[in-house]
Amino acid sequence: MIEQRTGFDAVDPERSAEAFRDLSAGKVITRERFDQIQNDMVENPVYTTLFRNHEHFRAMYQHLGYELVFNDKRHFFFMRELSNSEDRDYNRNAFKIQVALLIIGRYFAQSGRDLQYLESPAVGLRENDIAAIAKDDEYTIMLRSAEFKEGVEAAFGFLRNRGFLFETGVNRYIMSPAGMYFLEKLVELYQEKIAVTTEESENYLVLQDSDGT
Amino acid sequence: MSSKRFGTIETIQVIFQYPDTFFDLIQAMDERNELSVPEHELLYRVERAMSSAPTKERKRIHLAFRTANLAGSGLMSIDKKAGIPHFYFDDSLLQLLRICDRSLRQDLTNAKLKARLSSLRELKRQIIDSNLHSGSPDFLEACQAMSGELNSVIRLIHGNVRDLEMDVSKRMEDISGAIAMSNERISITRHYELLGEITTIHQRHILPTLEFLNPSMKLKDGENLHEALEGLGEACRAHSHFDMADQIDRSLISLNETYKPIQAIAKRVQDFVAKNQRSLRQHNAMESAFEDLRDLFTETQTSHLNRIQMKGDGFVEKTGFMAGLISRSYPSVLELHDNVSTLRLFRSDLEARLEDAVRVDVVPQLPTSIAERTKNGLNIERSEILYNWLRDMPLPETRDLVSHIHERLSTFVGGYDSMVDLMDALSYIMSHRRKEVSIKTTNRFKTLEDGGQHLIYRLRKVTPIQKEEIND
């Protein structure tokens, strides 16, 4: 009898271990990452491994009590805890990430720049941007209230370590596709909200009309 | 002083020395689509011009722009609208000023272009009506007029494209500059205003010109420019008026050449507006999300006196982004911490278990059958066995008394049933308090699962009482 090939045969154990180490540390695995030496985006081999053996990893992590989540819009993986949403800490990391990303996005939009420049290595976030965020008392106090005790610096470190920001130089960052996805999602939700409001007001006008006649 | 007056030339000199005053007025009139301005609008702008001029000049400006002076020089007439004096300026003065400022040129608004087209159509009709007879004076006159009209249309369109190109570039630069300059926060209203100016140019100047030049544009009221000119050219050629036909062809080629650049301008403006609209939408989206966060923060600050950290579950759920992202690489249930208190708890728990193991010879065996237990006698007997065991059981420090007792009983006591015996044991412990420990019941709830049954209980903490305290 021929033994059935399992997913394990197809995967390099070292890569697999690396993937688990990164994922279990709460990192996102993006398709590309920024390489400071080449000063350009380069392919991320861990992503490739996960992508090629998606079904294998999905099943394996499921057996360990985790869900491997793939985002097909911005091409990244992350791992979430399975069915434990009553846990007080279930959304703790997600919240920290959302708050930090939102503050960066808001700061950037308020300075009149298009959000797409956040992921452009030629623009991105520079030292003066980080200083400007740090100088804003409201941002600092909100970051503290989201468990970044050291404020902006801690938030940037947190996002960088988890793959939401790429460091492009000394005190220079660009946003990773995973970070961009969140900001794009916010814009999308806002648009939906606006559409609903317009629809509601249109309905209201129609109602008024029928009342009048 | 008050009787002093400037002549027309001097007045015009002052007007052109301070052209912004009139540029502004013309713009205001254009925006309202009116031919006059109310008195106060002129006064306000003259005041502004004076305030920025040197003292010596102020008198000159004041004199030149005085109502009596302007009216006396024949540069304007006054009429009252709803009791307010309105000024009507001389048309040639306004035309001259328009030539000086590109943005004020009106030549190619929709209405003007339509007028041009209909006069071309009319001339064509006249030429055709004259049967294109070379001897007919009507034909010669119409041909001459047609030549003139064609040249003037081409000149106008060429000039306008050039102007638009520069004007649009300048305005886009202004907007980008205004955004870049305001390092922190550009006012959104200002942003909309700037965008409004550019869209006005697009709507009033660029689009009509594009439509005017577009060979495939269908018009309700008749032929478009191309159809009219091509038809006329064919007619001329058929009647051997080759000079005229050639001129029409050249004009068509020339107008065609203008179509592309103006299309390019239109595209640039559309892209620019789209990009800015996207920026504004992004800006509003960020504001809206940040407002939610601010609400959460305020709520945390005002309604929870001793809570500093925001509770972000609701916030996270809005986008669902990264919800449940793994936050630790070790199992949380162990709650192992590298500190004294954890180690002490661990040790005292271990000691208690060892104690249980030492007493293994007196471990009770509880009646197993449920039927037996339901009889009162047996229930008491069962409880007695359990109480005997509990009486000498050491109670160490623990953060969760219920699960601690459950663990110990289920390990050692035969026939143990969590739902019956655990409750029994707990009520015994709570009613037979020991001197050396204090038991505190908290308001936190936990769930214990055993054999498919769930018990929700309040967390009870056991802490040892210091010896001195007992003596007190």
Image (cartoon, coloured by chain):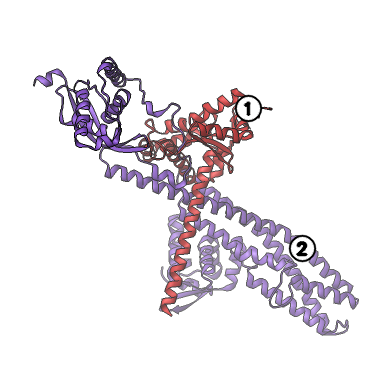
Chain colours: A red, B purple
Q: What mark, if any, has residue A11 been given in the picture?
A: 1
- Quadrant location of the N terminus of chain B? bottom left
Q: Which residue is mark 2?
A: B256
On the rendered structure, is B161 left or right of B17?
right
Q: Is residue A48 above or below residue A208?
A: above
Callout 2 environment at 10 Å: few (<14), some (14 to 19), or many (20+)?
A: some
Q: Is residue B442 above or below residue B389?
A: below
Q: Position of residue B128 (x, y in %)?
A: 82, 82
Residues B318 and B37: in front is: B318
Q: Let me know if residue B60 appears in the view.
A: no
Q: For the residue marked with disc 2, what is the amino acid?
A: Asn
| C-alpha distance separating marks 2 and 1 | 63 Å
Callout 1 environment at 10 Å: few (<14), some (14 to 19), or many (20+)?
A: some
2 and 1 marks in contact (CB < 8 Å) = no
On the rendered structure, is B35 left or right of B232?
left
Residues B94 and B303: in front is: B303
Q: Which quarter of the figure has residue B391?
A: top left
Q: Chain of mark 1?
A: A
- Quadrant location of the C terminus of chain B? top left
Q: Chain of mark 2?
A: B
Residue reaching furthest top?
Answer: B358
Residues B363 and B448: in front is: B363
Residue reaching furthest left?
Answer: B472
